[in-house]
Image: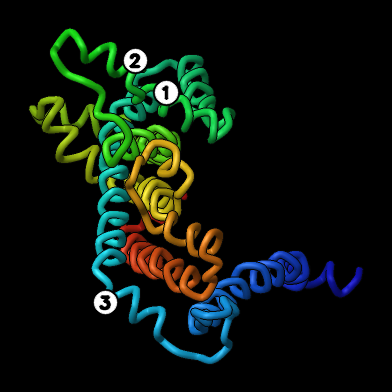
């Protein structure tokens, strides 16, 4: 018997070493490079990057009103998308976990996953057509004397909520599936109604699953810029600022400084989520 066979821990360590090294180089290394780049500046005259460390980019980011507004708007939309997805996901996930038959449950899981098979751009442009001046939204609203809201914050919120909804449904479904059916029976035996059972038993037990799903919806919204370009009109989020500065403006240091904001926000969010036990739901 070889040394590796006699020591299972060594075997596991050898198996995990390559992916952990890749994670350290590709992910942590990239974050380190991002942070270093954010401390450089761009020469206003030549457009070249000056590799002299300074906090000027962060000073601009936190002192200029437009960037503060965009930061607050991005966090607000990410939170709103998360709440909308949570409200929509709960009844769907509850039906899948506790009411649907095993065969129907499998079909519903496939139905939830099916939108993920379609192209992101196809789905975003489909919602652009929905909110266009002669689109279905305008057609439905016309008999009531209303019109389509057009492209902007509402269209952005609706589109992002649709795009990330499966990422909320699946963790909530998994969390509700772990709730023992005996708790529903015990609650009914003690005289609790359906709403009281949902409020005092189901929701508290499913809360970590909601937080787990919110990690996806919140982080994906924080970093999105394509859907905002398609349906957002003049709306800008942090992702658009990063894209515009890295692309058209070619100001990579400032783009890197802006990109650190979602990273810091998500690290704080993950630290708070960890205290709820949500990471065990993933």
Contact? badges 2 and 3 (CB < 8 Å): no
- Tell me if 188 is positioned left or right of 264 in this view: left
Are circles 3 and 1 on residues that touch, CB within 8 Å? no
Crowd tier of the residue under label 3, counting other residues whose Cα lies within 10 Å: few below 14, some 14–19, many 20 or above: few
Q: Quadrant of residue 23?
A: bottom right
Few, some or many C-alpha atoms within 10 Å of disc 2 (few <14, some 14-19, many ≥20)? some
* Cβ–Cβ under 8 Å for marks 2 and 1: yes
Which residue is nearer to you in this view: 215 or 2? 215
Which residue is drawn at the image coordinates 35% and 48% (left, top)? 214
Report, in whole angstroms, how far the alpha carbon at label 2 lies from the one at label 1: 8 Å
Determine the residue positioned at 84% across, 67% down: 5
Image disc number at residue 219:
none
Say whether residue 12 is left or right of residue 225.
right
Q: Which mark is residue 63?
A: 3
Residue furthest out toward the top: 143
Q: Earlier in the sequence, mark 2 or mark 1?
A: 1
Q: Name the secondary structure under disc 2.
A: helix
Which numbered disc flags the more N-terminal residue, 3 or 1?
3
From this viewpoint, is residue 135 visible? yes
| Quadrant in which residue 227 is drawn | top left
Q: Within 10 angstroms of label 1, few (less than 14), some, or many (20 or more) residues?
A: some
- List the residue tagged with mark 1: 129
| Quadrant that contains the N terminus | bottom right
Q: Classify 10 as above or below 192.
A: below
Q: Which residue is mark 2?
A: 136
Whole-angstrom CA distance, mark 2 to mark 3, is: 42 Å
Which residue is nearer to you in this view: 27 or 73?
73
């Amino acid at each position: 018997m070889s040394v590796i066979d006699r020591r299972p821990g060594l075997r596991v360590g050898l198996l995990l070493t390559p992916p952990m090294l890749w994670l350290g180089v590709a992910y942590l290394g990239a974050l380190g490079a991002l942070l270093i780049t954010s401390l450089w500046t761009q020469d206003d005259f030549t457009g070249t990057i000056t590799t002299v460390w300074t906090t000027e980019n962060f000073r601009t980011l936190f002192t200029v009103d437009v960037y503060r507004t965009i930061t607050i708007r991005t966090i607000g939309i990410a939170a709103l998308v998360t709440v909308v997805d949570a409200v929509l996901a709960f009844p769907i996930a509850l039906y899948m976990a506790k009411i649907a038959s095993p065969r129907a449950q499998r079909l519903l899981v496939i139905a939830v996953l099916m939108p993920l098979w379609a192209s992101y751009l196809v789905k975003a442009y489909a919602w652009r057509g929905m909110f266009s001046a002669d689109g279905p939204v305008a057609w439905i609203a016309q008999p009531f004397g209303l019109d389509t809201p057009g492209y902007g914050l509402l269209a952005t919120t609706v589109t992002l909520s649709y795009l990330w909804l499966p990422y909320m449904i699946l963790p909530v479904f998994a969390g509700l599936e772990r709730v023992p059916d005996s708790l529903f029976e015990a609650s009914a035996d003690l005289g609790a109604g359906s709403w009281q059972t949902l409020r005092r038993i189901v929701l508290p037990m499913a809360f970590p699953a909601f937080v787990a799903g919110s990690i996806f919806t919140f982080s994906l919204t924080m970093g999105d810029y394509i859907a905002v370009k398609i349906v957002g009109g003049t709306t800008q989020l942090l992702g658009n600022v990063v894209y515009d500065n890295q692309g058209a403006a070619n100001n990579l240091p400032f783009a890197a400084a802006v990109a650190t904001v979602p990273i810091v926000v998500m690290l704080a969010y993950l630290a708070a989520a960890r205290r709820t036990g949500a990471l065990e739901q993933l």
